[in-house]
Amino acid sequence: MFHLAAGRVGSLAAKRATAALSTSSARMMASHGHEVSTAVDMSKPQYTDSADYPLPDVPYKQVLTDADKSLKQKEKGPWNQLSKEEKLALYRLKFLKTYPEMRHSTPEWKTALGAALFLMGLTGFIVWWQKVYVFPKRPRTFEGDWPEKQLKRMLDMRINPVQGISSKWDYEKGQWK
Amino acid sequence: MFRAAVRLSVSGVRSLTRTQPGCQALLASRGYSHGKQETDEEFDARWVTYFNKPDIDAWELRKGMNTLVCYDLVPEPKILEAALRACRRLNDLASAIRILEAVKDKAGPHKDIYPYVIQELKPVLEELGISTPEELGIDKL
């Protein structure tokens, strides 16, 4: 049925072909009802709950019981004779969710925000741990009066006198400008 | 009363013109800058005719409604009446209720449009025996 000339076909094509083979065999198995898979037939119209698509292509419940069928028969008559429960039942046969049910928000954002902040906190912890246990000692050029002496030396050498650090030092008054 | 409240957008409230005769925006439903612009009345008439087709089929009803809700407007009660009568001809109460839900949804933050529409449709709803979502309790979660 599906011949793979392994020698001729490149590895990528072989992988794609294998995938196609396994998909088609899965479909075959689904149609024979051996597997648990409830593969949806995407070639048929689907039911969707969408606020901008009020009347979906198919009713929600397509397999009707006898009670449903008799209700559908009653629907052909005057609707004034239907009770509220019957009207609701007819609605739920055709639609899964009402508009409020479709539209209502979930508290998922709290989970998402919480997880994000937690991971940021975890990252912060890892950074601190690295500072304590991983990073080597700071160079001695940061300790004691070294930085001050270093800065004085830079000013004496007139480092970056035009726009840089020495330009910010007032040499006459001996202070920053 | 509706002048400030019922301004959905610039091209918005074209169909809901009953209460504000001065605010009619003469805009076509298509985004052409050339050609003759369709008036609100022409738009409404076209849609009423569409739903009034005696032998309208279920697909046409669905197509009509799904298209109508995609426009930036709340349909006039007379268009909705034609759609509800089409539901009656198709023996489809569920879709009629769904249409009312969709109208409420289309009004968005303008909370006074839906009660007005229901008020206008009251005779039709009573005649055909269509319950509003509020009467059935499905307007709440």
Image: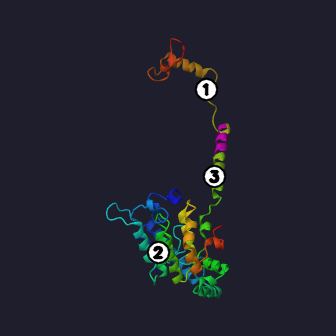
Query: In the image, which disc is placed on residue A142?
Result: 1
Q: Position of residue A167 (x, y in %)?
A: 47, 20
**Residue in view at x 46 percent, y 70 percent:** B67
Q: Position of residue A72 (x, y in %)?
A: 60, 85
Does the stretch in magenta take in B31? no
Query: In the image, which disc is placed on residue A113?
Result: 3
Residue range corresponding to the magenta coloring: A123-131
Structural crowding at the residue carrying mark 3, measured as other residues with C-alpha within 10 Å and reported as few (<14), some (14–19) or many (≥20) = few
Q: Upstream in the sequence, badge 3 or badge 1?
A: 3
Marks 2 and 3 sit apart, C-alpha to C-alpha, by 40 Å
Marks 1 and 2 sit apart, C-alpha to C-alpha, by 75 Å
The foreground one among A106 and B77 is: B77
Q: Tell me the subunit letter for badge 1.
A: A
**Residue in view at x 38 percent, y 62 percent:** B31
Vertical arrangement, residue A78 with respect to residue A161, above or below:
below
Q: Secondary structure at mark 3?
A: helix
**Amino acid at dot 2:** Lys
Q: Secondary structure at mark 2?
A: helix
Q: Tell me the subunit letter for badge 2.
A: B
Task: Give the residue number, with chain letter if any, for mark 2.
Answer: B63
Q: Secondary structure at mark 1?
A: helix
- Which residue, as the protein is rendered here, is positioned at the far top? A172
Can residue A57 be seen by looking at this rendering? no
**Amino acid at dot 3:** Leu
Q: Position of residue A29 (x, y in %)?
A: 56, 80
